[in-house]
Image (cartoon, helix red, strand yellow):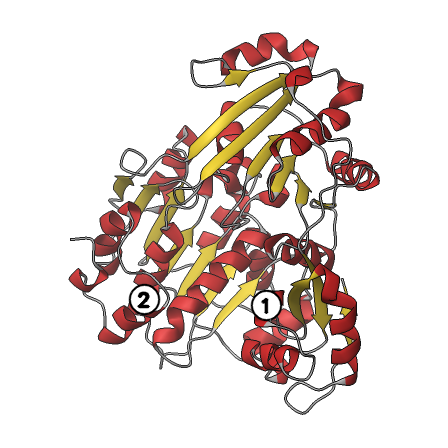
Amino acid sequence: MNNFSNLHLSKEMIQNLDNIGYTQMTPVQEKSLPFILENKDLIVKAKTGSGKTAAFGIGILQKLQVKKFRVQSLVLCPTRELADQVAKELRMIAKFTHNIKILTLCGGSSFGHQLHSLRHGAHIIVATPGRVLKHLNKESLNLDDLETLVLDEADRMLDMGFIEEIQNVISFAPQNRQTLLFSATYPDEILNLSKSIQKDAISIETASVEVENKIVERFYEVDNPLKTDALVKILSSFKPTNAIVFCNMKISCDDLAKDLQKKGVDALALHGDMEQYDRNDVLVQFSNNSCSVLIATDVAARGLDIKELAMVVNYDMPHDSETYTHRIGRTGRAGADGLACSLYTPTQISFIDEYKNNKRIFEDISDLKIDTNFKMRPPYITLVIEGGKKDKVRKGDILGALTGDVGLKGSSIGKIDIYDRQSYVAIESSLIDEAQKKLKNGKIKGKRFSTWIL
């Protein structure tokens, strides 16, 4: 029963889902999609990585009237990173037909550029609450034809103080609409929000049938001045291929990244004070294995979609158990083994007692063996090409140039990410200088593009 062919989907949609590897529905898709296709309001409790984006994405795209060039669906997300991730997945699902326009509206991007894009129209908007409200107030965005409103990770949006913006955005939407609310938790604020914006909402929970991530949880007591050395010791002992390290403060991310770099660990910081282009550069490098360790705050890391994450480290313990669960849930996905390590100081012992159970391992940091020659360097380095979608550059064009004129083997080339005006290519570290030099003097699709190493 969990085949997409059992739903009222077009043949083109089912064929495209099969092409992109969506062969069977996840529990959240199986439970929610029939109701979404029937235009019912839903409040869905599902954790990150459960397939919820595809659940509402397939639903709104199947019902979309392509010839009606108006905003028919609005997806609100707590962060720019999650909005970009959602839009990327929607575009992949939307390949079942032509001419569907999906537009992201987030802070940190040029407002003027967004105005220009909106003048050309869109079918689906994926946005953060503050930026979409700004467009609504300036009347550069109209929701009169909105049929479906989606609140993705609604609990996090409320945690970040977006409740007023959300309510203001909804005031611009038609009352006769479908509202889909997705949340990892059901605090009272979420239930109250559901009552105020939804009609006869059907409640769906899938946590009980979702496969638990296989995560080993380890805890270490460390004096505050020695935490960086303890972190290096953990990385040296377990040798993860990659890791996300969580700090509670933005400034701590920058300081820790610099300290780790001095100790031979390739690390980059990610936090809300960074410019959007800097954030994009960091995210691209971490996702394509050009950076081994990402140091991030909870807000900055929200919405990151890293398929294979070997380790999560709580450099600073989170303020509550829900945040802890969300942090460590990024590792051990899709049946893989995960590892979560947490550092706590002697002053936090009473607080840490709440975490003790028969599954979590509390051990002495001195028991870990450190490799004195330990270095953590990524297998790839990112090459940036000053050409992208707007220049009609495709992944095949870049791959062809690198394996042809440049002479690289396909196995030496990693992930390729193409944006509007730039493309990012992960290239084996030892070959990056040669590749950049040859491509700088070569051509892609008969054109010369500037290149540089990130």
Q: Residues within 10 Å of mark 2 (few under 14, many from 20)?
A: many
Name the front one of labels 1 and 2: 1
In the rendered image, residue 82, in percent from the top left (x then y), is placed at: 53, 52
Q: Quadrant of the C terminus?
A: bottom right
Q: Residue at x 42, y 59 (%)?
A: 173
Question: Which amino acid does the dot numbered 1 rest on?
Answer: Ile
Task: Report, in whole angstroms, how far the alpha carbon at label 1 lies from the one at label 2.
Answer: 22 Å
For label 2, the SS is: helix
**Towards the viewer: 440 or 423:** 440
Q: Residues within 10 Å of mark 1 (few under 14, many from 20)?
A: some
In the rendered image, residue 189, in percent from the top left (x then y), is placed at: 43, 32
Q: Residue at x 32, y 46 (%)?
A: 198
User: Mark 2 sits on what residue?
Assistant: 17
Q: Quadrant of residue 315?
A: top right
In the rendered image, the residue lying farthest to the bottom is: 446
Left or right: 373 in relation to 78: right
In the rendered image, residue 51, in percent from the top left (x then y), is placed at: 37, 51
Q: Could you tell which of marks 1 and 2 lies nearer the N-terminus?
A: 2
Left or right: 418 in relation to 383: left
In the rendered image, the residue lying farthest to the top is: 350
| Residue 281 in sight | yes
**Towards the viewer: 144 or 272:** 272
Q: Residue at x 80, y 76 (%)?
A: 437
Question: Which amino acid does the dot numbered 2 rest on?
Answer: Leu
**Residue 359 vertical position relative to residue 258 in the rendered view, above or below:** above
| Residue 175 in sight | no
User: Mark 1 sits on what residue?
Assistant: 416
